[in-house]
Image (cartoon, rainbow, N blue to C red):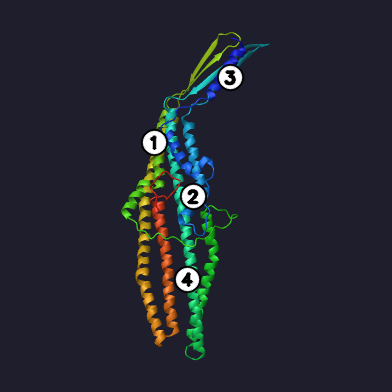
């Protein structure tokens, strides 16, 4: 056989091997299917999805969708998951074959032997490594899901706080207007001797206090708006987002037992830790496989004396028993650590659930008291004082005091309602892991 023929055969074999495909590992096809399903919604054709055009009339769900598609934290978690899916293929694949040449030269080239070699991992090693990679990929998905839920919670929290601030500004301005009217009335009475100086000073001091609070609220609006902008994934150089005209408040109630069941069933942090346990268990199998030798086989052909072939084979010798024992012990320790972390997270989840449920119930009770009892009574008081003012039985200061009490209660109601919505968002998103509608996730169990 002529040298050019052998070289051509070796080159052709290289091209054949270059087009080879391995056998998918268990879980690899499912991982790619799941990633593709999410990518179609989140990054179709590996490009950023088209963002909604936000307006002051946009709903809360519109702002949430914009935030999820534009958040750099969510995007980073998505591509971490993408990398882990590809790693399954890497871990289950055979090593690349090697093309080698050997020559003997005295005064001239007397022997030329091209050859092809293939490393062959020990039986079961590639499958065991693929199982570890598949479990790690599941953990990366749940890290992505956690990032989606965290981004949603951050947006909702900033949204409610911005709405609260606007309502606080409105109520503070109304309070200041009442106090200024009262101050003018008391000053007139003081000039005619119908009111004492301490009464005038008290009203003026209250005006100054509310004016300062109003100024502080107006100053804080910039930072609150910047926080809202950041949760939408907008950089400081980009234009400010539109401020919603109307802020949506859910006002829904929760079933504590059902929500706790959902929390233990689908909390993404728990799911990620369960995946860590599976990865650790698969890692033990990998450690045990280190006792199995690896192989290397090849064939070299003599170009100048055909047909003359040199078959070659080698085998690794896993003789370092202490090293193998240490790898197995390390893998078992990782498993125990992962299981302990999972148990600790389950305990923390129960505690966090109890704390957030208490916060939700406390704010719900307080809100019901203010809206159903205190505010109606304050309105009734205003009507009574107003009737007395018309008949001369009550002075103007009593009327403005009653109106100011109502405004303070309305302000307290707005603050309590905001705390309630944030506690509810924390319960449903961060604790129970219930995703918002149209979130780019695998789960179909979504909250409104």
Q: Position of residue 371 (x, y in %)?
A: 37, 68
Dot 3 lies on which element?
helix
Q: Name the mark on residue 68.
A: 2
Q: In front: mark 1 or mark 4?
A: 4
Residue beneath disc 4: 171
Q: Which of the labelled discs sits on residue 281, or is there none? A: 1
First in sequence: mark 4 vs mark 3: 3
- Badge nearest the viewer, 3 or 2: 2
Residue 219, percent from left and from top: 55, 66
- What is the quadrant of residue 26 in the picture? top left
> Crowdedness of circle 2 by 10 Å Cα count: few (<14), some, many (20+)?
many
| In this rendering, the label closer to the viewer, 1 or 3 | 3
Q: Earlier in the sequence, mark 4 or mark 2?
A: 2
- The answer to whether residue 246 of the structure is visible from this angle is yes
Mark 3 crowd level (few <14, some 14–19, many ≥20, 10 Å Cα) = few
Q: Residue 11, which numbered label? A: 3
Mark whose residue sits in front, 1 or 2: 2
Q: CA distance from mark 1 to mark 2?
A: 34 Å
Q: If the image is split into quadrants, where does the N terminus sit?
A: top right
Of 295 and 382, which appears nearest the observer?
A: 382
Q: Is residue 120 above or below residue 380?
A: above
């Amino acid at each position: 056989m002529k040298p050019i023929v052998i070289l051509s055969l070796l080159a052709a074999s290289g091209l054949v091997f270059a087009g080879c495909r391995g056998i998918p590992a268990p879980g690899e096809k499912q991982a790619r299917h799941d990633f593709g399903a999410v990518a179609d919604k989140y990054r179709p054709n590996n490009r950023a999805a088209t963002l909604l055009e936000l307006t002051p009339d946009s709903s809360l769900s519109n702002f949430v969708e914009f935030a999820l598609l534009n958040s750099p934290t969510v995007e980073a978690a998505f591509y971490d998951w993408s990398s882990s899916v590809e790693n399954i293929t890497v871990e289950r694949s055979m090593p690349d074959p090697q093309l080698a040449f050997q020559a003997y030269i005295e005064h001239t080239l007397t022997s030329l032997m091209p050859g092809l070699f293939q490393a062959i991992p020990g039986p079961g090693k590639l499958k065991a490594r693929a199982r570890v990679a598949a479990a790690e990929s599941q953990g990366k998905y749940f890290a992505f899901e956690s990032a989606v839920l965290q981004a949603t919670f951050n947006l909702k929290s900033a949204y409610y706080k911005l709405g609260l601030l606007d309502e606080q500004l409105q109520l503070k301005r109304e309070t200041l207007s009442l106090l200024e009217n009262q101050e003018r009335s008391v000053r007139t009475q003081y000039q005619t001797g119908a009111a004492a100086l301490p009464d005038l000073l008290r009203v003026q001091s209250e005006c100054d206090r509310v004016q300062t609070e109003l100024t502080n609220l107006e100053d804080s609006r910039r930072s609150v708006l910047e926080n809202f902008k950041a949760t939408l994934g907008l950089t400081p150089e980009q234009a400010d987002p539109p401020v919603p005209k109307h802020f949506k408040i859910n006002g829904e109630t929760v079933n504590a037992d059902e929500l706790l069941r959902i929390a233990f069933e689908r909390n993404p942090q728990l799911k990620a830790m369960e995946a860590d346990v599976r990865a650790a268990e698969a890692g033990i199998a990998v450690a045990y496989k280190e006792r199995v030798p690896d192989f290397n086989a090849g064939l070299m052909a003599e170009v100048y004396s055909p047909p003359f072939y040199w078959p070659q084979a080698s085998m690794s010798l896993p003789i370092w028993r202490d090293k193998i024992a240490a790898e197995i012990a390390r893998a078992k320790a990782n498993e125990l650590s992962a299981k302990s972390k999972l148990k600790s997270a389950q305990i923390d989840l129960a505690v966090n659930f109890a704390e957030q449920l208490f916060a939700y119930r406390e704010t719900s009770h307080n809100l019901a008291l203010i809206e159903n009892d205190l505010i109606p009574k304050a309105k009734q008081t205003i009507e009574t004082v107003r009737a007395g003012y018309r008949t001369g039985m009550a002075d103007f200061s009593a009327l403005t005091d009653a109106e100011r009490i109502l405004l303070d209660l309305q302000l307290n109601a707005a603050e309590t309602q905001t705390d309630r919505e944030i506690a509810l968002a924390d319960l449903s998103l961060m604790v129970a892991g219930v995703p918002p509608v149209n979130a780019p996730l695998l789960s179909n169990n979504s909250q409104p």
